[in-house]
Image: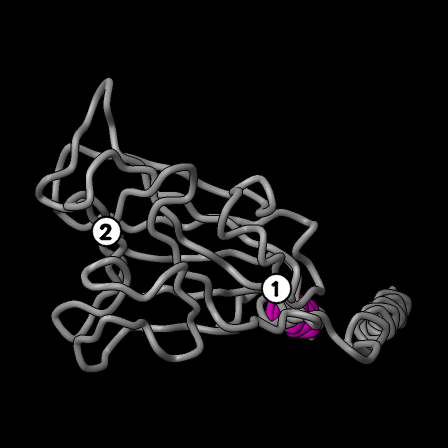
């Protein structure tokens, strides 16, 4: 009986931990829409011109452009409301364009974020964003990355942005399956830990009575 009660308490504790720790999808975009010279779905592009920022192949975001200063090509998501979440992460797939350079003249893809509403100056100066991640590759196959935004993004409302640093107009990157996740913060006290302690205390008392009876 004692073993059964302890097993039940441990199982309940594990279930509680799993329910609290499991990350929820707060916002996502798979870019599954018609090819276009704009991104759509609430995204904002730095500029709307031919083959700079938009949807390619009906399922991916492209960022191709070279402009003076940084960023070159850039797109910012619609507002992400994570006011009831912590441990915020961004997961996404990305790949380089076939004309990209790698090495001493490498072209780079960046992920940044800013509390909403993001500063309009972010389109002309990347220092107005919180830079979270950067990468480059000499290959054109898909990669999957997960980036934690840090405690500053917890319980906030923000925008994420992808931007590039390239040297030619025909260089850039593709993105797919962008997903923002976080751990939801309980809004009310969870009574299970207290009830678990009471159950353990009762099990201990029951075991003590059994020992006295056996003597």
Frontmost residue, 192 versus 61: 61
Q: What secondary structure prevails in the magenta region?
A: helix
Point out which mark residue 38 bears: none
Viewed as shown, does residue 201 lie left or right of 83? right
- Where does residue 90 sit, x and y in percent of width and height? 46, 57
Q: CA distance from mark 1 to mark 2?
A: 24 Å
Q: Which residue is mark 1?
A: 158
Q: Which residue is mark 2?
A: 64
Residue 178 lies in what quarter of the image? bottom left
- Where does residue 205 sit, x and y in percent of width and height? 89, 70
Magenta span of residues: 4-15
Counting residues from the start of the chain, the first of labels 1 and 2 encountered is 2
- Where does residue 85 sit, x and y in percent of width and height? 66, 67
Q: Residues within 10 Å of mark 1 (few under 14, many from 20)?
A: many
Question: Residue at the location (46% across, 56% down)?
Answer: 161
Question: Residue at the location (27% across, 73% down)?
Answer: 31
Image quarter in which the N terminus is found: bottom right
Count of marks, rendered view: 2
> Mark 1 touching mark 2, by CB under 8 A?
no
Q: In this rendering, does residue 17 appear at all?
A: no
Q: Secondary structure at mark 1?
A: strand
Viewed as shown, does residue 32 lie left or right of 213? left
Question: Residue at the location (82% across, 78% down)?
Answer: 191
């Amino acid at each position: 009986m004692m073993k059964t009660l302890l097993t039940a308490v441990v199982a309940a504790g594990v279930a509680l931990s799993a329910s609290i720790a499991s990350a929820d999808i707060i916002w996502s975009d798979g870019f599954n829409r018609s090819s276009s010279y704009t991104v759509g779905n609430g995204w904002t592009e730095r500029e709307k011109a031919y083959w700079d920022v938009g949807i390619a192949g009906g399922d991916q975001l492209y960022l191709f452009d070279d402009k003076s200063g940084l960023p070159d090509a850039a797109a910012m998501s619609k507002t992400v409301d994570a006011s009831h979440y912590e441990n915020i992460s961004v997961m996404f797939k990305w790949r380089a364009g076939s004309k990209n350079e790698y090495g001493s003249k490498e072209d780079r893809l960046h992920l940044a974020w800013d509390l909403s509403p993001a500063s309009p100056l972010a389109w002309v100066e990347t220092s107005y964003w919180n830079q979270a991640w950067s990468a480059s590759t000499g290959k054109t196959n898909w990669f999957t990355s997960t980036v934690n935004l840090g405690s500053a993004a917890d319980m906030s409302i923000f925008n994420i942005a992808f931007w590039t640093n390239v040297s030619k107009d025909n260089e850039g990157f593709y993105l797919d399956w962008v997903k923002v996740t976080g751990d939801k913060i309980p809004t009310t006290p969870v009574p299970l830990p207290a009830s678990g302690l009471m159950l353990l205390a009762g099990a201990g008392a029951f075991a003590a009575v059994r020992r006295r009876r056996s003597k």
